Image (cartoon, grey):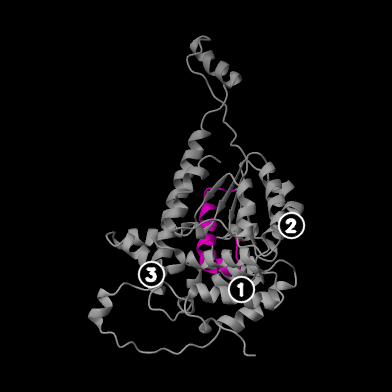
Amino acid sequence: MSTPSYRDYRDLTESIIGFADYARSSNLNVGIREAQEALKVAALGLISDKTLFRYALKSIFCSSADHPLLFDEIFSRYWDVPYEYKKSSVDIKSRINTQKPAIRSLVFMGKGAVQEGKEEETSEVSGANPTEKLRKTDFSKVSDIDSTRLEKLAMNLWKQMSRRLKKKFRHSNSKGLIDIRKTIRSSIGLGGTMLELKLKDKKPNKNRLVILLDVSGSMDKYSFYLLRFILALRTHFQNIEGFIFSTKLIRITEYLRVKNLEHVLSQLSAGADNWSSGTKIGTCLQSFNELHAKRTLNRRSMTIILSDGLDTGAPELLSKELGKIKRRTRKLIWLNPLKGMQGYEPLARGMKAALPQIDVFRSAHSLESILELEKYLADV
């Protein structure tokens, strides 16, 4: 019997259901609920990115340690089938007057001319100038031409944000308690009349910002921009702790003290052998709690997790370890790039398990969405 593929079906819905049947016949625990979640993932537009789509389905279809390897094998067999184009005989005028068809399973392989969602985003900001468009553009959809411009714009705006935060911080710590000794000394020359109160220098609170960045395969198009954001924050938060994770946790705080940005990125890429691999969020948070939480977290700290929540581990472990972090920190923020997609719902098992423990759940898919984080950072 020949191996089934998406080409055996007429549309995306049938292809997804066919893949669920194939996965079940290959000894994966896939039922109706998993098939429904896979359809929702495709409907959100994740299918437009093959790597993202793979990891999304893996988080749904895999329920034990031996499943991921089997899943990768059957996914490649089913979806990695060469496709041959057939030239359409429809003329240009007919195409203009014809309603665009729904996204098909070929689009995420780069075979389609336009990705659904990308076209919608373009129309949303079509009246804006190029800078405004870049601010609103999803990081995963930035062209090679625009990536350099976006990087310069992002670093400039993030530095401005850091300066504003630093100014607020200095102002809030500019006045302390009355210094009796200094006040009495200054009044001696005035016959003992205390005309001016002398204040003690207020010691700034040792607030700490703790950031955990997901660098798994499904986050690949966002990770470097988000890492640049973390590096920009170091100008304001000198007391910052940074970690990256996918299948294991790596502390990167020492790298954040290096001034050369490109050197930092190259060092991290070389040192993080789990960059762009799978995701075990619960396991990585467990490592954080066991090795670092007691030293880095307190009731004055703010913890930010940057992840799409597509976890291949047990959701119960993720919820448990996230609860431990919440009890130790002042505020727990989760930034999810997928939240910026139209119609997104946190249906993945990992994200659903995490939501009850989170204080703030926001997007981090564009420059503009990250800049909105300033109002939370100002409270640290």
Q: Is 216 within the magenta? A: yes
Name the image quarter holding residue 102. Answer: bottom left
Side (left or right) of 10 relative to 98: right
Q: Is residue 236 shown above or below 149? A: above
Q: Main secondary structure of the magenta part?
A: helix
Residue 350 rendering spot, x and y as whole percentages: 64, 58
Q: From which residue to which does the magenta span run?
A: 214-238
Q: Secondary structure at mark 3?
A: helix
Q: Amino acid at mark 1?
A: Ala
Is disc 2 surrounded by few (<14), some (14 to 19) or many (20+) residues within 10 Å?
some
Q: Quadrant of the N terminus?
A: bottom right
Q: Is residue 242 shown above or below 206? A: below
What is the spatial separation of the Cα atoms under label 3 and label 1, in whole angstroms?
38 Å
Residue 127 rendering spot, x and y as whole percentages: 27, 60
The residue wearing badge 2 is 287
Q: Are marks 3 and 2 in contact (CB under 8 Å)?
A: no
The residue wearing badge 3 is 146
Specify whether residue 112 is in view.
yes
Specify whether residue 209 is in view.
no
The residue wearing badge 1 is 20
